[in-house]
């Protein structure tokens, strides 16, 4: 081939102990193109990126950059060669400020000292550029994971790069932020920057990419121009089976209406200063209540008060008719309230522990340390959930940090389903999950609620919320502004309208 | 190889290497136990084990504390307190030989040191003080407390008191301290691995926030672990004092916290918390004990001790670093790649023809 490839990877093999993550994969990136890498959870997308950028060494194969063979020893070396990357798991320093994170390693200087004022100014410009407004002097950890993701993107975009790699950059973003990001990508493409884009949102992929490379089980399925590959064909290539899975989601959505069931949980004036204004919310047995709103509208904060993850400073909470006192994650779990937090890496999983240990953690915690779960029972439970959720590799003894992002999410889900809660609070449960698995999880939520479990469902994806929910609480500016309950109101448009109107009508 | 076996591999290799050096220097007598005239086991290696027992007890407790992302700097001072309480109680009694006296002294020492340990835990878990600071307080104050107990003197226990059996005696030919160490190791292993305590500890150390949200009682667990650590230090102090027949508030167990931390690290438990390895720590302790003899056996002066320890730490740390291991193993790992790439030049040659 003689077309000028910017990056050409051929025959890439990557083995982890016991798992072949990449098996003879070829990948070509041409100047100025936006190239999507597609595949199920665990297909090897992130690994391919990590091999290219020197996070992992490869066991066989060749990488050419501008026709020269390269083998980067670290992401830093890759960056020096013009490859800038936003990895799937946000990799910034929590307790440094936003500005420091944005400009780490290339701070403006005054002689030997860092010029903090110039640094804050530069950081502000960078963020303005991609249209977000943050206090650049605040520690990064004070912002949500979505904001952190945007900071990571702003940082990568700023570095003058020939190649920009974005591994699931949009997984926790809202429509508006996604639009901003896609706009930035188009601008860069026009300037000639080549981009690799990984996302499980097919509409975004179709909107932005020129080409796609599809992986399945660590093998290359093929490379297509986006215009030549229909959505159903793509899903077929990704899953290795027909695209039937997607249609099933719609059917799972035949959500049953719960009208007269007694309330399971009632929040009255529940609130927390600086986090969420006092709100009233009722969840009935077997009901799926969705929380919708824009980024930073207080969805997570609302859920955390009910979960006992944060302490409310006003209002009361009733569960099964009784007033709840001394609410914290442990007592909540004992009552049957389970909480799946949005940030699986920092709040969800214990990376060094195995898949099995992570799964049984909540159940074990509720039994106390002295009564360990009998091995046979534990193995059976773990095996059944690995099977039910399709976790791959199906190895209960693998450290959970070695799993792909989507599979980690499933492990976290399993942890809470295992304790058979009465109320399951899911904060962004389908983040980073592939189309097939997303359908599985949505179906699961529908099934669980049909069996009488109540679910509080938080998601940035309005389609998902409307499809699953019996009622939808809409939030804006850290305030619950309206609860939509008519069947006819369960549409994305209606939610957006409500947010725009500020809840005054309805 | 299981992850546990993998972690243990390098410490075991180093220990074997040290033993080999000693055997080369002094003959197989180094490792083969001899039977003393009184029917007790002796010999160089048995003595190393016997001498290492106080350090082992402390290092085991330290392992659990470190697994929670903590550290306990006060163990040396707690050792001194345990020793002081026991010796002073016995000295103050009318009959040093009475079993009741000795048992009271031991029980009192253990209860007090356990309470001190729990206090460390409360400061860390309930008051949120950083472990290194919280335990530093007692590291400094503890020896003062021990001096108050002994009134600034060094209490001595008569050689005839049964208390001295704890450090000097033997049961079924095997020295009593070794029995105590074996029992403590077994008890802690059962406590952590037969219950869920070990996993919950690793969870709290590995990700405290995730553990909290999973509903783990991390405060209770933290206090328990510091309590066990204090108890281990107290027991170590008893054995040390019994062996010497006296309690020195200033020098008993001096700097033992550093050796304990060293042993934990050599044994493969990361200071960052999470996974812990009691067996690894045990091997670490034996390595440290053997090292001291090795220096003398190969004819170096004892001033080399610290340097040699530093070198061992350095080597172990290197071997445990994934980066260094990958670098060292590179020549071996290249083979599969060479195999895959081999046909390529051949093709190129064909193309050239
Ligand atoms: N450090 C590691 N050690 C062992 N196995 C690993 C490691 N990293 C990844 N793997 C395995 O390699 C395979 C590919 O993982 P990868 O993260 O590349 O998937 P992915 O396509 O990015 O999936 P996702 O969409 O879920 O992010 C998985 O089976 C995973 O378990
Ligand atoms: Mg990935």
Image (cartoon, coloured by chain):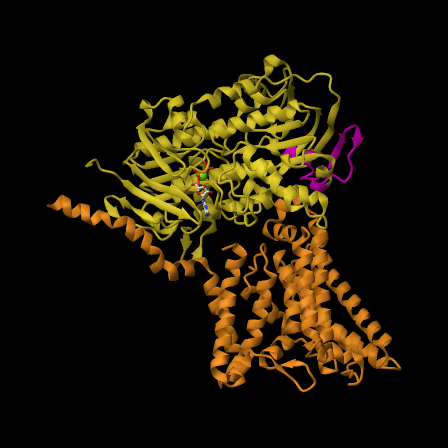
Q: Position of residue B228 (x, y in %)?
A: 71, 62
Residue displayed at 50% across by 44% down: A98
Q: Which chain is yellow?
A: A
Q: Position of residue A64 (x, y in %)?
A: 27, 45
Question: Which image quadrant is residue A460 in?
Answer: top right
Q: Where is the C terminus of chain B found, in terms of image quarters?
A: top left
In the image, is residue A90 above or below residue B28?
above
Q: Which chain is orange?
A: B
Q: Position of residue B161 (x, y in %)?
A: 80, 82
What is the span of residues highlighted in magenta in the rendered image?
Answer: A301-330
Number of marks in the rendered image: 0
In the image, is residue A484 above or below residue A412?
above
In the image, is residue B253 above or below residue A77?
below
Q: Is residue A324 visible?
A: yes
Q: Is residue A342 visible?
A: no
User: If the picture is divided into quarters, which one holds ligand 1?
Assistant: top left
Residue displayed at 38% across by 42% down: A22
The question of residue A321 being in magenta is answered with yes
In this rendering, would A174 be left or right of A58?
right
The question of residue A66 being in magenta is answered with no
Residue displayed at 66% across by 35% down: A338
What residue occupies the far right of the structure in this picture? Answer: B94
Q: Position of residue A341 (x, y in %)?
A: 60, 37
What residue occupies the far left of the structure in this picture? Answer: B353
């Amino acid at each position: 081939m003689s077309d000028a490839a910017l990056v050409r990877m051929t025959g890439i093999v990557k083995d982890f102990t016991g798992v072949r993550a990449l098996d003879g994969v070829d990948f070509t990136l041409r100047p100025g193109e936006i190239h999507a890498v597609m595949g199920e959870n665990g297909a090897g997308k992130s690994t391919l990126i990590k091999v290219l950028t020197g996070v992992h060494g490869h066991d066989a194969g060749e990488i050419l950059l501008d026709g020269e063979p390269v083998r980067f020893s670290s992401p830093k070396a890759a960056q020096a060669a013009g490859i800038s990357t936003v990895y799937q798991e946000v990799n910034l320093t929590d307790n440094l400020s936003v500005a420091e994170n944005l400009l780490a390693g290339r701070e403006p200087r005054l002689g030997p000292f860092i010029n903090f004022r110039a640094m804050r100014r530069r950081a502000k410009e960078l963020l303005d550029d991609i249209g977000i407004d943050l206090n650049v002097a605040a520690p990064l950890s004070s912002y949500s994971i979505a904001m952190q993701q945007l900071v990571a993107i702003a940082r990568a975009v700023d570095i003058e790069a020939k190649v920009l790699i974005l591994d699931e950059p949009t997984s926790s973003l809202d429509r508006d932020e996604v639009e901003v990001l896609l706009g930035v990508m188009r601008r860069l493409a026009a300037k000639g920057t080549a981009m690799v884009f990984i996302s499980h949102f097919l509409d975004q992929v179709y909107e932005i990419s020129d080409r796609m490379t599809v992986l399945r089980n660590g093998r290359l399925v093929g490379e297509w121009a986006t215009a030549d590959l229909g959505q159903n064909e793509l899903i077929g290539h990704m899953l290795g089976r027909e695209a039937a899975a997607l249609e099933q989601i719609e059917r799972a959505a035949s959500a049953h209406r719960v009208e007269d069931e007694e309330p399971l949980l009632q929040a009255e004036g529940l609130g927390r200063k600086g986090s969420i204004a006092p709100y009233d919310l009722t969840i009935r047995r077997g009901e799926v209540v969705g929380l919708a709103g824009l980024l930073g509208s207080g969805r997570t904060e609302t859920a955390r008060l009910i979960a006992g993850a944060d302490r409310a400073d006003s209002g009361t909470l009733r569960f099964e008719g009784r007033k709840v006192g001394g609410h914290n994650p442990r007592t909540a779990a004992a009552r049957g309230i389970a909480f799946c937090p949005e940030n699986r890496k920092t709040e969800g999983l214990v990376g060094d522990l195995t898949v099995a240990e992570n799964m049984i953690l909540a159940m074990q915690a509720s039994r106390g340390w002295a009564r360990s779960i009998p091995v046979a029972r534990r193995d059976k439970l773990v095996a059944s959930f690995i099977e039910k959720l399709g976790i791959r590799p199906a190895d209960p003894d693998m450290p959970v940090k070695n799993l792909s992002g989507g599979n980690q999410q499933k492990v976290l889900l399993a942890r809470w389903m295992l304790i058979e809660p009465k109320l399951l609070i899911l904060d962004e449960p389908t983040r980073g999950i592939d189309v097939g698995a997303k359908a599985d999880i949505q179906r699961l939520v529908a099934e669980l609620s049909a069996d009488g479990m109540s679910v509080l469902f938080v998601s940035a994806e309005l389609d998902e919320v409307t499809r699953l929910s019996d009622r939808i609480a809409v939030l804006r500016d850290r305030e619950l502004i309206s609860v939509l309950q008519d069947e006819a109101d369960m549409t994305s448009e209606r939610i957006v309208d409500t947010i725009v109107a500020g809840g005054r009508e309805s | 190889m299981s992850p546990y076996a993998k972690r243990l591999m390098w410490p075991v290799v180093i220990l074997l290497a040290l033993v080999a050096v000693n055997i080369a220097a002094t003959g197989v007598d180094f490792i083969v136990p001899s039977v003393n005239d009184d029917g007790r086991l002796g010999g160089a290696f048995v003595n190393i084990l016997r001498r290492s027992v106080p350090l082992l007890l402390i290092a085991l407790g330290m392992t659990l504390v470190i697994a929670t992302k903590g550290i306990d700097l006060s163990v040396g001072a707690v050792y001194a307190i345990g020793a002081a309480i026991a010796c002073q109680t016995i000295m103050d009694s009318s009959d040093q030989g009475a079993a009741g006296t000795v048992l009271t002294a031991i029980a009192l020492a253990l209860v007090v040191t356990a309470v001190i340990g729990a206090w460390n835990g409360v400061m860390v878990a309930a008051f949120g003080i950083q472990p290194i600071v919280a335990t530093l307080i007692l590291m400094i104050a503890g020896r003062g407390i021990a001096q108050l107990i002994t009134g600034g003197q060094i209490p001595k226990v008569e050689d005839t008191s049964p208390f001295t059996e704890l450090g000097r005696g033997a049961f079924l030919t095997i020295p009593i301290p070794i029995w105590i160490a074996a029992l403590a190791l077994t008890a802690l292993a059962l406590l952590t691995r037969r219950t869920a305590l070990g996993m919950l500890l690793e969870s709290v150390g590995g990700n405290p926030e995730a553990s909290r949200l999973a509903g783990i009682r991390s405060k209770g667990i933290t206090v328990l672990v510091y309590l066990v650590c204090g108890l281990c230090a107290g027991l170590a102090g008893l054995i040390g004092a019994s062996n010497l027949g006296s309690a020195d508030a200033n020098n008993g167990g001096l700097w033992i916290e550093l050796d304990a931390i060293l042993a934990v690290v050599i044994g493969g438990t990361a200071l960052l918390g999470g996974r812990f390895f009691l067996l690894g720590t045990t091997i670490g302790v034996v390595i440290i004990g053997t090292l001291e003899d090795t220096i003398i056996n190969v004819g170096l002066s004892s001033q080399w001790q610290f340097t040699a320890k530093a070198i061992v730490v350095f080597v172990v740390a290197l071997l445990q670093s994934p980066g260094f291991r990958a670098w060292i193993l590179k020549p071996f790992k290249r083979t599969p790649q060479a195999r895959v790439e081999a046909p390529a030049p051949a093709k190129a040659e064909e193309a050239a023809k």
